Image (cartoon, helix red, strand yellow):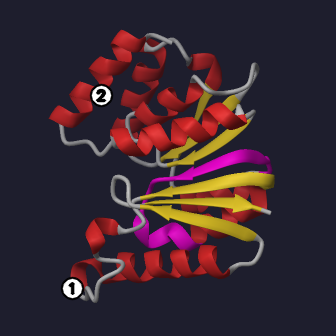
Amino acid sequence: MNKIELQKIKEKALEEHIPIIMDDTLEVIQRILEERKPNKILEIGTAVGYSAICFSEFLSENGKIDTIERDLDRVKQARENIKLTEVEGKINIYEGDAVEILPTLNETYDIVFIDAAKGKYPFFLKEAMRMINKNGIIIADNVLYKGYVMGDYNKHKQRTAVRNLREYIKEITENENIETEILEVGDGLAISKIK
């Protein structure tokens, strides 16, 4: 992987205010990936490809990442970035809305990373549970959403996102087949191990 290009991608995304994975969040996930050496990762929310490129370094020998993005400009940028960092053979982008694409996938994954529309997290979880391998891990970013999720936040604009994130947290903490840890890194990171 071309680390110099990766650094440039990160700087450009930050300059253009494109939401990319935060450094402390990335560190936590990289430790998990290093330990697991996953063969297949599913990422919901590609943006410009930064996190997928970072994750690709930790795949097992012929490992693959499937990533889904609906914003066509970002898909184009992600494809360019994947090429620049020389990891084309490891990352496959599905272009379109994850809500429509996920039900059509019949793969199984060692790791699922959720980092897309917050209002859709419960749906993403249901689909992830269908495709995750036994002992797999589902990781969801931004689950505390600026602290709104744990507070008594009720502004109209964010209400659906907050309600659905709360539903997501309830499901991953109460489901007896899932062992969950919620870390206060970045904007909240939920790590759910499937028993």
In the displayed structure, would residue 69 be above or below residue 4?
Answer: below
Q: Position of residue 20 (x, y in %)?
A: 34, 41
> Which residue occupies 75% across, 19% down?
61
Instruction: Determine contact: label 2, label 1, CB under 8 Å.
Output: no
Q: Residues within 10 Å of mark 1 (few under 14, many from 20)?
A: few
In the displayed structure, would residue 149 be above or below residue 49?
Answer: below
Give the residue type at disc 1. Lys
Looking at the picture, tell me which residue is in the foreground, 70 or 11: 11
> Which residue occupies 75% across, 33% down?
39
- Mark 2–mark 1 distance (CA, rounded to whole Å): 32 Å
Q: Is residue 148 left or right of residue 46?
A: left
Q: Which region of the structure is painted magenta?
A: 106-122
Q: Position of residue 108 (x, y in %)?
A: 79, 48
Count of marks, rendered view: 2
**The magenta stretch spans residue 118:** yes
> Residue 174 falls in which quadrant of the image?
bottom right
Give the residue type at disc 2. Lys
Q: Residues within 10 Å of mark 2 (few under 14, many from 20)?
A: some
Is residue 37 among what the camera can see?
Answer: yes
Question: Most extreme residue toward the right, as rendered?
Answer: 134
> Which residue occupies 48% across, 28% down?
54
Question: Dot 1 corresponds to which residue?
Answer: 155
Sequence-first tag of 2 and 1: 2
Question: Dot 2 corresponds to which residue?
Answer: 10
| Quadrant containing the C terminus in the rendered view | bottom right
Instruction: Say what secondary structure mark 2 lies in.
Output: helix
Is residue 66 among what the camera can see?
Answer: no
Q: Position of residue 167 (x, y in %)?
A: 52, 81
Instruction: Say what secondary structure mark 1 lies in.
Output: loop
* Label of residue 39 in the image: none
Q: Position of residue 129 (x, y in %)?
A: 72, 64
Question: Most extreme residue toward the left, as rendered?
Answer: 15
